[in-house]
Amino acid sequence: MAGSGEVYKGAEGKWEFRVKASNGKVLAVNDPPGYSSKAEARSVLTKLLKGDYNGPIREPAAVAFGQEITASITLDGDLSGSGGPALIVTADNVVVDLGGFTITGRGSSAAHPGILVRDVKGVTVRKGTVTGFGAGVAIAGGSKNVIENVTAQDNIGSAEGDFGDGITVKDSTGNIIRGNTVRRNGPFSGISLVGACTKNEVRDNTVSDNNMLPADPSMGRQDMGIRIEGPGANNNKLIGNTVTNSGAEGICVLPTCTDPQVGCAGTPGNEGNEISKNMSHNNGTSGQGSGIRLFAVPQPVAASKTVITDNVTNQNVTFGIAIDTVGSANPGPPKNKISGNSGTGNGQFDGYDGNTPACGSNVWKSNKLTKVNQPCVGA
């Protein structure tokens, strides 16, 4: 069989192979379940390329723009089209392997995600690029899905629409977003957790240049690197990410309000989230923004019980790490623990807590911050 071969580890931990033509198109793949060792997979592939193998192989499934995915697939080329989503995953425990190829949206695609993982569990999306949509990849409902090694770039939604992120998770639990490259998305953020998102991990992603303003600059500088929006986004972990050059905050946990017209009392807050071992630098490129911020405004319910530890926040336009306040009648985020962080060269303070006296119920400990706004921050 003509072509070149590639051996790789599949989603189930088995070794697999594929044969590619000179233009990168996948000609054939092994028939599942794969091989127990890399050497075994390589041996079979070598025989296949020499024309000396009669075992099971299969042609990769053809995939079309707009297709509903109910079984594992590997792309054999780029996909592009208008509208969207380009792929809609509706079955549990499938693998969507982009095979290093690119899915591109055009025209009306800005109203849709490129890949929608809808009300399913155990799905893996990996190894490719999604660009030109309102969001690159969106998980809506379901649980325990994985988005890994995906490049989500240049996905720009409407400030009035549902999408405006590189990767977004909504009302879903136990998902892992890891090892992705997320850049130049907006106008909301690179990666977002929206609604009742619990026990998700956003880990080891590179999140850069998410600094798109809405069409109307007066609407504010809202494009963030990673945001936890909620309401009810609890016990999530943001670990080991590198976040740079966001238009507003690098990493932000927002206050919540179900219905501002009748008041925010009773709205679930965002509680118990962990922000650790991240690097968040040079954020606020549109004029203001901090490395890590627990946001507060009048009425909405502030985030609480956040653990912020072992992060590095340098050269951000406003603050390195900031905990807001809005006055004694509605104090800022309470019961947070901030320890082991470092920061220098930030525009106003490397560490800021607006709660007085003595940082309220927040505990700052063992941080290396050059400039702080009150002694309790430098404790």
Image (cartoon, grey):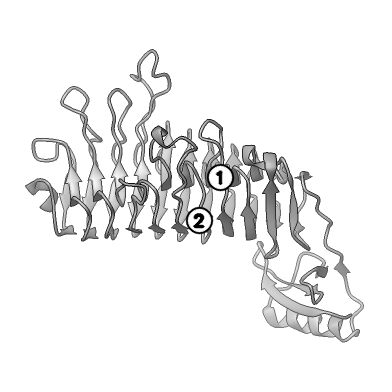
For the N terminus, the quadrant is: bottom right
Q: Position of residue 311 (x, y in %)?
A: 29, 58
* In the depicted structure, whether residue 310 falls above or below residue 307: below
Q: Position of residue 83 (x, y in %)?
A: 72, 40
Q: Residues within 10 Å of mark 2 (few under 14, many from 20)?
A: many
Which residue: 84% across, 56% down? 62
Q: Secondary structure at mark 1?
A: loop
Q: Amino acid at mark 1?
A: Ile
Which residue: 38% across, 29% down? 256
128 sits to left or right of 253: right
Q: Nearer the viewer, residue 286 or 292?
A: 286
Does residue 131 show up? yes
Q: Furthest-top residue in view?
A: 262
* In the depicted structure, whether residue 116 falls above or below residue 4: above
Between the C-alphas of marks 1 and 2, the distance is: 11 Å
Does residue 93 show up? no
- Residue occupied by mark 1: 156
Q: Amino acid at mark 2?
A: Arg
Which residue: 77% across, 48% down? 65
Which residue: 57% across, 43% down? 143
Name the N-terminal-most of marks 1 and 2.
Answer: 1
- Residue occupied by mark 2: 183
